[in-house]
Amino acid sequence: MGITARRPGEQDDVTQSDESAQTTPLLTEIDHIAIAVPDLGDAIDYYRETFGAVVDHREVVESDGVEEALLKVAESYVQLLTPTRPDSTVAKWLEKRGGPGIHHVGYRVADCGVALESVKRQGFRVLDEEPRPGSRGTTVAFIHPKDALGTLIELVEE
Ligand code: V0V
Ligand code: CO
């Protein structure tokens, strides 16, 4: 029951006794839940009016073609995300889905490079070969949703 995802070409009955499996926990906390929206202002208003949530940080991340608003919830964030240009992957995602929804989950890790190497060593596809800058000065790397139970995963080192 320990298996978390399947490597390309593997059978269903593989268990975590595999030598390459990661046995010490890499994920320390949930850093953020990212919700992609067509209109950032409307989304911020919704969270403020409905839950009294306030914006903790706002940033445009040019490399990803997104603007974010981070709302703090305890030690984690809700990351409201909107595309800044039509060729942004988030623009494509919103169009395909037809509206807002959960786009990815960011998990906090102690060392993004170590976590990323572990994922790669186990044969899972990653979207960043090396850790790179994320928002608010973090270091991040993304794992392909097709190798992560259909969920786009972002490893986040603060
Ligand atoms: C696509 N797919 C997803 C998905 N996006 N599945 C789950 N969650 C998502 N967010 C599925 C899609 O339905 C297809 O499945 C398949 O993956 C390939 O999708 P595609 O539309 O052909 O591919 P692209 O070209 O849109 O690329 C999708 C990926 C891309 C995930 C490769 O979005 C990517 O590289 N993401 C990493 C960077 C990123 O997301 N940046 C924005 C946030 P079917 O239909 O073939 O079954 S930046 C951020 O959060 C920062 C900076 C931060 O927090 O600090
Ligand atoms: Co994110």
Image (cartoon, rainbow, N blue to C red):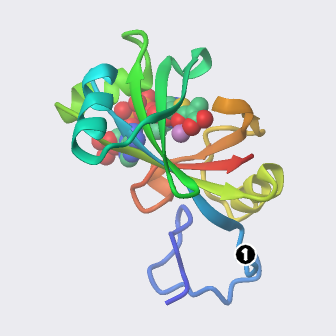
Identify the residue shown where x is 53% and y is 47%: 144
Q: Of the residues shown, which amino acid type is indicated by label 1?
A: Gln
The percent coordinates of residue 89 (x first, y second) are: 43, 25
Q: Residue furthest top?
A: 85
Classify 131 as above or below 8. above
Residue 125 can be seen, yes or no: yes
Q: Residues within 10 Å of mark 1 (few under 14, many from 20)?
A: some
Residue 134 can be seen, yes or no: no
Q: Secondary structure at mark 1?
A: loop
Q: Is residue 51 left or right of residue 32?
A: left
Quadrant in which residue 133 is drawn: top right
The percent coordinates of residue 121 (x first, y second) are: 76, 61
Identify the residue shown where x is 68% and y is 38%: 128
Pointer 1 residue Cβ closer than 8 Å to ligand 1: no
Q: Is residue 105 left or right of residue 117?
A: left
The percent coordinates of residue 88 (x first, y second) are: 44, 18
- Foreground residue among 101 and 128: 101
- Marks counted in the figure total 1
- Foreground residue among 90 and 124: 90
Identify the residue shown where x is 72% and y is 58%: 109
Classify 8 as above or below 131. below
Classify 37 as above or below 117. above
Identify the residue shown where x is 42% and y is 62%: 149
- Foreground residue among 76 and 99: 76
The percent coordinates of residue 114 (x first, y second) are: 82, 57
- Foreground residue among 74 and 154: 74
Q: Residue furthest left?
A: 98
Q: Which residue is mark 1?
A: 22
